[in-house]
Image (spheres, rainbow, N blue to C red):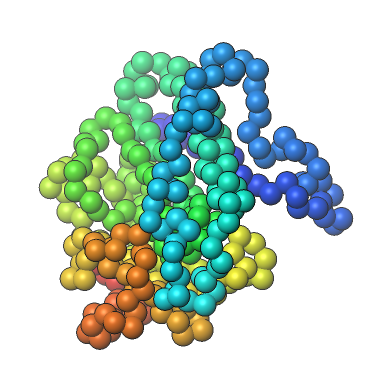
Amino acid sequence: KPLLLYVAPMAPHIEDQTIAPTETDGFQEGNDPWRWWARWDPRDETAKGAIMSYIWNVLPNYVALSAAFNEADVSDKPVFMRNELMDAGDKAAADFQYRDRLWCLLPVDDIVKKIVAALPPEQLANTVWILTSDNGFMLGEHRKSQKLAAYEPSIRIPLYISGPGIIAHSEAYIVLLQDVYQTLLEIGGLPVNTSADSRSLMPLLTSVTGLWNRKRFLVTHTQQSTGAAPDLPSFSAVRTGPLDAYPQRTYVEYIGGELEHYSLAVDPNELTNTALTAPGAELSALHGYLEPLKTCAGTSAITAEN
């Protein structure tokens, strides 16, 4: 029978050690400085010293090189996005977080190596590997350090799939994290679940001419009083892809009525909100895409995305 191994390391999460422990759950989260942060293994000083030094001292902070980092003018953004400019301390904190996250991923490499070593050759040759993450994160883009927003650094995640019969693609397609579920069903020889809001990636993974019609997808957030972004209002957004009539657009409707609109082909860093200047027909079409996406399920989700 097919074997599924799911490994979810904490890395590269960075947690705030200043949070006071609660008195109700008995879990003393704030008191252990080694609970979340990367632990220094003395063996790594020899085995990984060069790469550790490179990450901390040489590697450019590619986020800080983006025009979206500490965005110069946020007056066109919604009110809740208009943070003050980042000062030297803010920039240093973002740089530390960037490098520490990369450092935390070094032991993840070790995990993959150990799994590879544990598999007999015949199983290794018949294994599909999927590496991904649960969310993106802004590390100073648009003056923010958070997830959950509709901006590209927040909604995009890495997704790498390799294995027997899987081919590489040079074209850009919209695939979603929930598609992994249907893909695993098909790899395991089980029928796909037509009630789920996703589709198997196997047609795309096994053929350069595989039919892949997804043109757009839903991005949504519900505001909470606590958590990662308590000041971020609830919103629904549609992100279109290269196959859409309005390709590579992000259109966001906030619960308070504010809008955002970006054409990523000409503004990949989402610096200029064109919600007030974009053609009315385009805004109307994007709004029309969004409405069925907010309520669809199963096969109707595929229809709304196509």
Q: Quadrant of the C terminus?
A: bottom left
In percent of width and height, residue 101 lies at 54, 39
Q: How many marks?
A: 0
Image quadrant assignment for residue 189: top left
Image quadrant assignment for residue 178: bottom left
**Looking at the image, is 89 positioned above or below residue 1?**
below
In percent of width and height, residue 137 lies at 49, 53
In percent of width and height, residue 104 lies at 56, 34
**Looking at the image, is 191 positioned above or below residue 112?**
below
276 horizontally vs 43: left or right: left
Q: Residue at x 22, y 38 (%)?
A: 168
Does the image show residue 87?
yes
In percent of width and height, residue 132 lies at 43, 43
Q: Residue at x 35, y 70 (%)?
A: 272
Nearer the observer, 122 or 114:
114
Q: Residue at x 51, y 30 (%)?
A: 57
Q: Quadrant of the N terminus?
A: top left
Q: Residue at x 38, y 62 (%)?
A: 197
Nearer the observer, 241 or 297:
241
69 horizontally vs 182: left or right: right
**Looking at the image, is 224 positioned above or below residue 167?**
below
Does the image show residue 301?
no
Taking the view exactly as shown, the residue that stands out farthest to the front is 88
Nearer the observer, 219 or 53:
53
